[in-house]
Amino acid sequence: MAYAIRDGIEDFHLTIIFGSRTEENILFREELDAICAACDKVKVVHVLSDEEKEGFEHGFITADIIGKYAQEPYSVFICGPEAMYRFVSGEIDKLGLPGKNVRREMLGVTKKVWEQPGYPAECKDKTFKLTIRQGPNEYVVDASANEPLLVAIERAGVAAPSRCRSGECGWCRSKLVSGQYFTPAENEGRRHSDVVNDYIHPCCTFALSDMVIEVPGEYLK
Ligand code: FES
């Protein structure tokens, strides 16, 4: 994005809030400085967790730091190593931005869904019937409550679309016909209208009952 802004391909202001342990650990510093020098629409704020230095923010990337540098209205894009990502994600939640203004890196889906806030503990380790409708075809497969629906679909040999497998891209978007499910908050990338109209992302949806869904894609012969 920074290069696209510098080159005139995109036209918006970008502030990169870049977390590092120390000044010496900062990656891409020269590259970023060169972009900032060439284009006043791109700015970098370095946040050092292990060092206090003049000219740098100190600590982790918090909601306060983001709020200090963001120019209203704004969107945020989160990316980074997992521990940092999860921390920053929680901070961004505090900003109260509309969901469409928060874009997340493809982090994958939680491995232990039963540890997620709001998960009904009694469903852990259960197995449900998942009925998959795809065009004129219908398949019934076993789906563990502990795995995303997409895994059960693929294990059954059904060719369902997917890309990010993180709940972000919407490529696997499917219609829920019936059943109860759980989506971890950190993978909830659906539009509000999809939530209320019963569209799900099977890549990050976990069965809490028998389910019937309609998935798009190529029809198996
Ligand atoms: S594959 Fe991207 S949202 Fe499911």
Image (cartoon, rainbow, N blue to C red):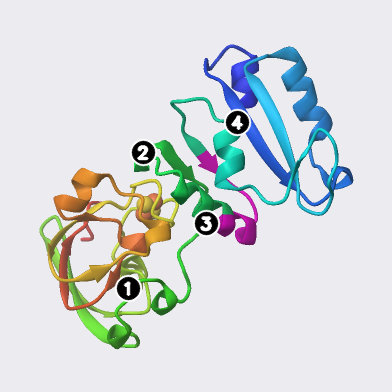
Residue 184, compared with residue 12, is above or below; it is below
- Residue 1 can be seen in this image: no
Residue 34, compared with residue 143, is above or below; it is above
Q: Nearer the viewer, mark 1 or mark 2?
A: 2
Residue at 14% x, 50% y: name it: 197
Q: Helix or strand or loop: what does disc 2 sit on?
A: helix
Q: Which residue is mark 1?
A: 152
* Residue 140 lies in the magenta stretch: no
Amino acid residing under circle 1: Ala
Disc 3 CB within 8 Å of nearest ligand 1 atom: no
Q: Which residue is mark 4?
A: 69
Query: Residue 30, how many percent across, how many down?
Result: 83, 29
Label at residue 100: 2
Viewport quadrant of the C terminus: bottom left
Disc 2 CB within 8 Å of nearest ligand 1 atom: no
Nearer to me, 35 or 66 = 66
Instruction: Report how far apart the C-alphas of labels 4 and 2 lie in the structure.
Output: 20 Å
Left or right: where 84 falls relative to 27: left
Amino acid residing under circle 3: Leu
